[in-house]
Amino acid sequence: MVLTYHFNFPGNFCSDKKPAAVNWIEGRGKSVVCEATIREEVVKKVLKTNVATLVELNMLKNLAGSAVAGALGGFNAHAANIVSAVFIATGQDPAQNVESSHCITMMEAVNDGKDLHISVTMPSIEVGTVGGGTQLASQSACLNLLGVKGASKESAGSNSRLLATIVAGAVLAGELSLMSAIAAGQLVQSHMKYNRSSKDVCKAAS
């Protein structure tokens, strides 16, 4: 006896909820590039570092480090943290964070080396604004706040496209924040102060 099964689901080539080169190369869902130029004075006064240090750190950590590790679509500092947070808040499928977090972060000095140009390229952000978790009360409220709830009556798919750009914009901000904290030495300091202080260790030991 031969049993034949017919399913209305795609094959794994798509490749849903799994890291795959096909999504990194061809894209899936929404493909977004987000970029910004940060003035030198902002880098120094707000981010507490300098352009040259950020550019070098990005090359060593996000590009070279990820390449040595054999990363697949993971040439970034922590895109998955931001994508997961936005996905949960807006009723997306959290499991699709796997391919939606594909991201390469680039930094370069511009305007005679004074200012910082940063970009994130995310080829496979999978988001929707209709159905599923988007109908939950809290998630629906978040979509309302972003102005992307439901289907657009003027332009089909425009709300989900806008949501994808919001995700990419949030990722860019997160990349800039974390990389600056690392460059300024603040990341370890804050963890030691708020998360791994000797006081807390003593409390746990007792």
Image (cartoon, grey):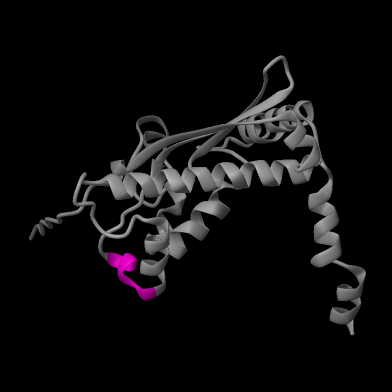
> In which quadrant of the rendered view does residue 151 lie?
bottom left
Whether residue 72 is visible: no
Left or right: residue 33 versus residue 44 is: left
Image location of residue 37, percent across then percent down = 61, 29
Image location of residue 41, percent across then percent down = 76, 33
Left or right: residue 35 versus residue 57 is: left
Q: What stretch is highlighted in magenta?
A: 132-137
Residue pictured at 40% horizontal, 30% vertical: 25
Residue 75, magenta (yes or no): no
Judged by its main secondary structure, the magenta piece is helix
Q: Which of 143 and 121 is in front in this view?
A: 143
Q: Nearer the viewer, residue 159 or 132?
A: 159
Image location of residue 68, percent across then percent down = 65, 32
Quarter of the N terminus within the rendering: bottom left
Quarter of the C terminus within the rendering: bottom right
Q: Which residue lies furthest to the bottom in this view?
A: 206
Looking at the image, is 124 positioned above or below residue 197? above
Q: Which residue lies furthest to the left in this view?
A: 1
Left or right: residue 63 versus residue 11 is: right
Residue pictured at 52% horizontal, 60% vertical: 85
> In which quadrant of the rendered view does residue 38 lie?
top right
Left or right: residue 197 versus residue 117 is: right
Q: Residue furthest top?
A: 112
Whether residue 23 is visible: yes
Residue pictured at 33% horizontal, 65% vertical: 134
